[in-house]
Image (cartoon, rainbow, N blue to C red):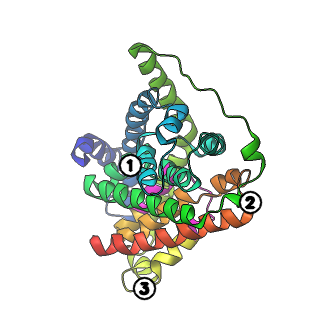
Amino acid sequence: MPGLFAPYEQFARWCTERVFGLDPASRLGSSVEFFLYDVPKVLTLLLAVSFAVGTLQTWLQPEAVRRMLEGRRLLFGNIAAAVTGIFTPFCSCSAVPLFIGFLKGGVPLGVTFSYLISAPMVNEVAVALLWGLFGWRVAAIYIGFGVALAIAGGTVIGLLRLEKWVEPFVWEVPAAAGGVAELTLRARIAEGWRSSREIFGKVWPYIVGGIAAGAFIHGYVPEELVMRWAGPGNPFAVPVAVLLGVPLYANVAGVLPITEALAGKGMPLGTVLAFTMAVTALSAPEMIILRNVLRPPLLAVFAGVMTAGIISVGYLFNFVL
């Protein structure tokens, strides 16, 4: 996939040298070239993938997903939920209605959590940007580890039998009646285009901001500084990166260009991707939203299990790569 963006790279180099009169080898020139190359590349990826996934979602509505997972039991249900989450990347704003609908439909608590972990973390934006920025191998490993984490996290929560820490009103909400009208292919494509425009409108400022931050890191942050604090010589680099990412308010689209710049400075890929997973799976907005349906002890267990899992994934990622 990187070869597909060669014209963007040539355009960025031409603008840096001819339009702005900068040396690409200088700090400022390197930052400008990074920014001019990444912005159109990442936005193109975002539009293409969000259109494809938006069209796919017309076949996989939340109610259909609930029916697929209904009645699934421990482990097998967790696997099905985590894999389903890859193809149904509902946003964090859908967390509460999905959570209520799944539990009311008979989906076990642990299986529900496997889905809620997988869907936002292994989503279309994260995978597309990872593929575009780091290649298919890194994207595939990220998907594998993300799904494994969703399965493990949901299984642990299911074994602990923490239903008593779900807010009582959840069990009192009447189950929604199913049924989605059949759409023509033309209507599905139109819905995919509408969905891609909506996603693009929401996340492009995060992308541009993230790329700007990444460009600054790329051009001005000394490699020696990055290697000293988060390089392979620091055995605590992964947990520090995860703990920094847990409370961070950020969109994954804005974080990945920063991880690209950090990786380019020599930070181990497992460390930067563990940071990304923490921001994606444990973002402040999602925690605030889930607090509406989870009591603090269950929310704390969820955050603790995920934090431990992401730290483990970071170390494994560094070992594999």
Instruction: Tell me, for residue 127, which label it has, or none.
Output: 1
Question: Residues under labels 1 and 3: Cα distance?
Answer: 27 Å
Left or right placement of residue 96 versus residue 185 in this view: right
Q: Which residues are magenta?
A: 244-260
Tell me the residue at 46%/32% (across/down). 60
Label 2: how many Cα within 10 Å (few below 14, some 14–19, many 20+): some
Q: Secondary structure at mark 1?
A: helix
The mark nearer the N terminus, 2 or 3, is: 3
Residue to which mark 3 is pinned:
235
Residue to which mark 2 is pinned:
295
Left or right placement of residue 71 versus residue 146 in this view: right
Instruction: Tell me, for residue 51, which label it has, or none.
Output: none
Magenta stretch: residue 252 in it? yes
Tell me the residue at 71%/60% (across/down). 164
Tell me the residue at 40%/44% (across/down). 42
Question: Residues under labels 1 and 2: Cα distance?
Answer: 31 Å
Residues at discs 2 and 3 in contact (Cβ within 8 Å):
no
